[in-house]
Amino acid sequence: MSQLRIYDDTRGDAPLATHTEHAAIARELAAVGVRFEQWQAAAPLAPGASPDAVIAAYRADIDRLMAEEGYQSVDVISLAPDHPDRAALRQKFLSEHTHSEDEVRFFVAGAGQFTLHLGDKVYEVLCEAGDLIGVPDRTRHWFDMSESPYFIAIRLFTNKEGWVAQYTGEDIAERFPRMTPHASAGAATTVR
């Protein structure tokens, strides 16, 4: 189940609010300029599916977003618990960073956790299959996929070079919950 927890940015041990209904999550995130939509993940794909197969399965939605927002490129990131570089990939995303463009992800399968640092609040968003998140450019954030990642996500970019991060050098991500895998395949949770 998708989830939003909102924290004071000085206290990662006690959420100020928790939301699990999609409409409430979308409303809270929209209030701070973050796009959050739920799409029907109708094309069943498993981690390891080729990027071409994933893009073909969602071509109509990709084309619509590219036309609406001017995105120039698309790719697919797919990770399974046995991926040999999972620890290095996880580490790459765990530090607070920004981008010069929106970070847009549509989760086709599995789950991942975006944590956004907006003003004096931290918004922890657990995204699951069917969730689309659009993090505005220059938003301080980090991403966690757990020690045992399981997800396929379509990524859209305005920069044809793809994912380029500018790290803030702050250690705030160390003070907030990490994502951990749940006992059932494809499900996830967060721990403090």
Image (cartoon, grey):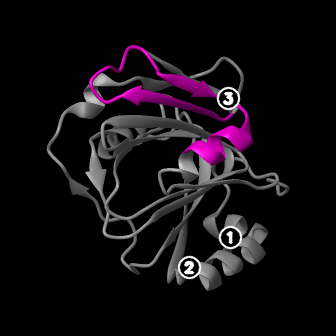
C-alpha gap between disc 2 and disc 1: 18 Å
- Choose top left, top right, bottom left or bottom right for residue 23: top right
Amino acid type, label 1: Ile
C-alpha gap between disc 2 and disc 3: 30 Å
Question: Residue 2: horizontal and vertical position, in percent?
Answer: 66, 35
Q: Residue at x 41, y 27 (%)?
A: 7
Q: SS at mark 2?
A: helix
Q: Given the current orientation, which residue lies at the most extreme left position? A: 169
Question: Residue 9: horizontal and vertical position, in percent?
Answer: 31, 30
Q: Nearer the viewer, residue 80 or 99?
A: 99
C-alpha gap between disc 1 and disc 3: 23 Å
Q: SS at mark 1?
A: helix
- Choose top left, top right, bottom left or bottom right for residue 176: top left
Task: Judge whether 157 appears above or below 154 on screen.
Answer: below
Asked if residue 190 shows in the view, the reply is: yes
- Badge 1 crowding class, 10 Å Cα cut-off, few under 14, some 14 to 19, many 20 or more, is some
Q: Residue at x 72, y 47 (%)?
A: 46
Which residue position is annotated with label 2? 69
Which residue position is annotated with label 3? 187
- The answer to which of marks 2 and 1 sits earlier in the sequence is 1
Which residue position is annotated with label 1? 55
Amino acid type, label 2: Glu
